[in-house]
Amino acid sequence: MKFKILFLATMCIFFTSAQAQRAGLKGGVNFTNLYVDDVDDENMKVGFNVGLFHRSDISNNFAIQPEFLFTQKGSEIQYSGFLGGSGKYRFNLNYLEVPVLAMAKIGSFNIHAGPYLGFLVGAKVKDIDDDGSVNDVESLDRDDFNTFDYGIAGGIGFDFPDGMLGLRYNYGFVEIGQSGVAGQATENSKNSALQLYLGFDF
């Protein structure tokens, strides 16, 4: 039900503006981290983002751009004696996200910022031992994490005749883990992502 509401709200944003200037496909690379207490180290995880964008010009120098994206987040976290043993945990979190960005345009360049709402569609945690053995953490799955995430996004972009290129940073406001093992393993942690993307108009 919550996903249906998110999807319908996004489609309304995409299609209610008859004066849309640009719409298309975009995708790119995510460099993500979680900030977790009681661990020795944190490692950036590489994932991807892909989806749709729809830009409506309000004036020559200002626009609104909502997007509907599938995006991979998470982190690889080194531990020593954390939940027993030593090695690292790999958190793989997949979201459907809807950023709505206000965009200031300066010629072909733009600066954009705005809120985003995310819906967790999948979560998998792996335990990688020092010897390289990979084991799924069977006690942790999507139900152990908060279903919704929200935060703020901001970045810079460059427009070319049939597309765009940009760099954006997303910071979540919601702690990703719920109670139990997931809450202990991810205490106070929030999503953080640097995104490099390329888009093309329909």
Image (cartoon, grey):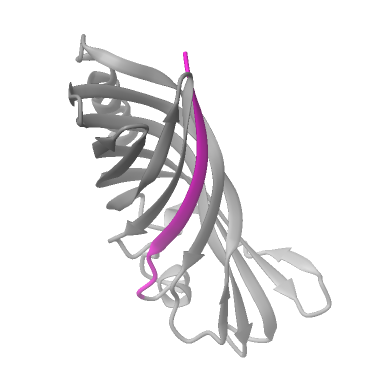
Q: Is residue 66 left or right of residue 38?
A: left
The N terminus: image quadrant:
top left
Outermost residue toward the bottom in this view = 81
Q: Which residue of the protein is positioned furthest toward the top in this rendering?
A: 18
Residue drawn at 23 percent across, 30 percent down:
64
Is 96 rendered above or below residue 16? below
**Where's residue 109, x and y in %?**
36, 38
User: Looking at the magenta stretch, what is its main secondary structure?
Assistant: strand
> Left or right: 148 with respect to 58?
right
Residue at 56% x, 87% y: name it: 40
Q: Is residue 80 above or below residue 199?
A: below
* Residue stretch rendered in magenta on the structure: 188-202
**In the image shown, does 128 or 151 lie closer to the viewer?**
151
Q: Is residue 147 visible?
A: yes
Image height check: is 196 above or below 106? Answer: below
**Residue 66: x %, y % from top left:** 29, 31
Residue 199 falls inside the magenta stretch? yes
Q: Is residue 117 magenta?
A: no
Which residue lies at the image location 55% right of the left edge and 64% below the top edge?
Answer: 75
Q: Is residue 37 left or right of residue 43?
A: left
Instruction: Identify the image quadrant of residue 80.
Output: bottom right
Extreme-right residue of the structure: 131
Q: Residue furthest left?
A: 59
Count the numbered circles shown.
0
Can see residue 149?
A: no
User: At which x and y percent is residue 65?
Assistant: 28, 30
Q: Position of residue 187 (x, y in %)?
A: 39, 76
Q: Give the quarter of the image for residue 97.
A: top left
